[in-house]
Image (cartoon, grey):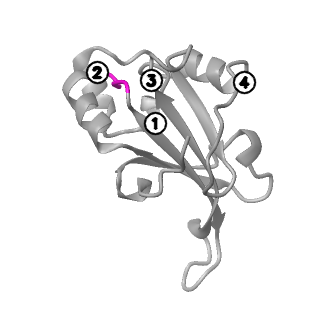
């Protein structure tokens, strides 16, 4: 999978603090997770409440900082990206319909093996399909209205 160089121009779904797990987790400062999705998949989700084939979700992880300029207490995102992971839907290409890719820099990435724990976690806890729509507040009403939101 090629690195999606323009993902920061895609639809921003949400940001979380301290939700990072796996190899991008930090034990010192909580990290920010920013989630983006390609525009065509987002528009289709708004119409149907489901993700179409061709959906590409980007998880961008950044270190947090708590002291800088006038900020001395809260957390803000650092300039450096700690990692980028993709969650891609292609039911013809991937045995489990979705695949995960983790990038080391901006070079191409191979799919994470089907035996990885990310598959089980997303399948068990994803609110729509295998995605964590429960953490994307602007999409929850759509999923509820379309009857696709799992509890």
Q: Relative to 31, does residue 144 appear above or below in the rendering?
A: above
- Do tag 1 and tag 3 residues touch (Cβ < 8 Å)? no
Query: What residue does disc 3 label?
Result: 90
Query: What residue does disc 4 label?
Result: 116
| Earlier sequence position, callout 3 versus callout 4 | 3
Give the residue drawn at x 64%, y 63%: 64
Is residue 67 found left or right of 44 in the rendered image?
A: right
Give the residue drawn at x 48%, y 51%: 4
Camera-near label (4 vs 2) is 4
Spot occupied by residue 40 in the image (x, y as percentages of width and height): 27, 38
Q: Overall secondary structure of the magenta stretch?
A: loop
Q: Residue 74: in sight, yes or no? A: no
Spot occupied by residue 146 in the image (x, y as percentages of width and height): 24, 18
Q: Classify residue 13 by image quadrant.
A: top left
Query: What residue does disc 1 label?
Result: 135
Q: Residue 107: in sight, yes or no? A: yes
Residue closest to the eye, 54 or 32: 54
| Earlier sequence position, callout 2 versus callout 3 | 3
Q: Relative to 124, does residue 61 appear above or below in the rendering?
A: below
Pointer 3 local density, CA inside 10 Å: few below 14, some 14–19, many at least 20: some
Label 3 residue SS: loop
Query: What residue does disc 2 label?
Result: 144
Q: Marks 3 and 4, how far apart in space? A: 18 Å
Locate the C terminus by quadrant. Answer: top left
Camera-near label (2 vs 3) is 3
The residue stretch that appears in magenta = 49-53
Camera-near label (3 vs 4) is 3
Q: Relative to 34, does residue 109 appear above or below in the rendering?
A: above
| Earlier sequence position, callout 1 versus callout 3 | 3
Residue occupying the far left of the picture: 47
């Amino acid at each position: 999978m090629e690195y999606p160089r323009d993902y920061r121009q895609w639809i921003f779904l949400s940001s979380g603090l301290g939700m990072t797990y796996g190899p991008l987790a930090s034990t010192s400062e909580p990290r920010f997770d920013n989630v983006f999705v390609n525009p065509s998949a987002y528009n289709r989700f708004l119409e149907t409440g489901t993700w179409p084939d061709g959906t590409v979700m980007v998880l961008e992880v950044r270190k947090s900082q708590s002291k800088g300029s006038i900020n001395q207490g809260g957390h803000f995102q650092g300039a450096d990206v700690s990692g980028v992971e993709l969650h891609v839907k292609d039911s013809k290409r991937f045995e489990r319909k979705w695949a995960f890719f983790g990038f080391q820099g901006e070079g191409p990435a191979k799919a994470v093996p089907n035996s990885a724990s990310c598959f089980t976690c997303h399948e068990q806890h994803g609110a729509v399909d295998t995605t964590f729509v429960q953490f994307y507040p602007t999409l929850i009403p759509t999923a509820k209205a379309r009857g696709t939101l799992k509890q």
